[in-house]
Image (cartoon, grey):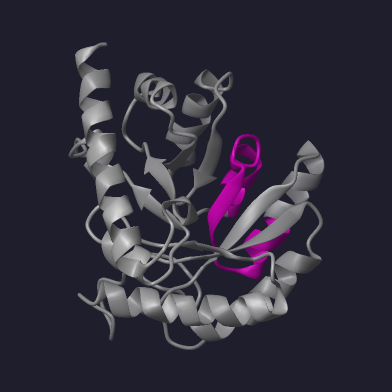
Amino acid sequence: MTDRKTELAANLAQVEERIAAACTAAGRKREEVTLIVVTKTYPASDVRLLAELGVRHVAENRDQEAGPKAAECADLPLIWHFVGQLQTNKVRSVSSYADVVQSVDRKRLVDALSGAAVHTAREMGVLIQVALDADSGERGSRGGIGPDGVEALAESVIAAEGLRLDGLMTVAPLAGPYEGRPRAAFDRLAEISSRLRAAHPAANMVSAGMSSDLEEAVAAGATHVRVGTAVLGVRPPLR
């Protein structure tokens, strides 16, 4: 086993222990939580090693990096998640490899994704990104739509050809009433998710929590956690 593969295996084992312990503490089954490894800034060779170690879900947040990496790893049995803020002019490219887009926060983006999905004859999963630092009708500082806009946007996704409404995503806010309170933020997302599932039972995915706060996310009912640094190491600065 290469040094890098050994390192990744050890890191994955530690993250697995954290998720399992968080599930036990929350009275949940381990299989209720899916690990998504965020591979941004790391090479396709790391994605290959992760796949060899059993990882099936990977995430990227910049199309200019994700597109070539996904193409290089097209032979692997992976589910690709796009988690970054997405401009409509990148939608055609993202739709060629992303199985799930987790950062949908406006109708214009829904329309663009639908058109691209139809063009490529693919069905794409969509998560509505909820901004818990946004006022009514506004977008959050890290993307996302305010809680009061979720219902209408969900209806847009449901009506859009080629798209599948899978659920909700959030990032713990850096400002506003939930600053420094990830558990409270994730509890709020769970409330919004409960309302969404009442109308759309299949939209049961709740993506929340990262390396620093995955335990709080699991405690609040997250079904998917997005972990990068704890698996791959501290990221090199972007040039």
Task: Report the residue that reaches farthest toward the top.
Answer: 1
The image quadrant of residue 164 is bottom right
Residue 125 sits inside the magenta stretch: no
Give the residue displayed 57% in from the left and 45% down from the top: 90
In this picture, which residue range is highlighted in magenta?
A: 88-112
Q: Nearer the viewer, residue 107 or 8?
A: 8
Residue 199 drawn at (x, y percent): 71, 79
Q: Decide if residue 23 is on the left or right side of residue 200.
A: left
In this rendering, the answer to whether 74 lies above or below 148 is above
Q: Quadrant of the N terminus?
A: top left
Residue at image x 34%, y 68%? 26
Query: Where is residue 83 drawn, in percent x and y?
Result: 46, 51
Q: Position of residue 58 (x, y in %)?
A: 45, 38
Task: Look at the picture and state if 185 lies above or below 29.
Answer: below
53 on left or right of 76: left
Location of residue 177 in the rendering, given as x and y in whole percent from the top left corner: 28, 86
Quadrant where the C terminus sits is top left
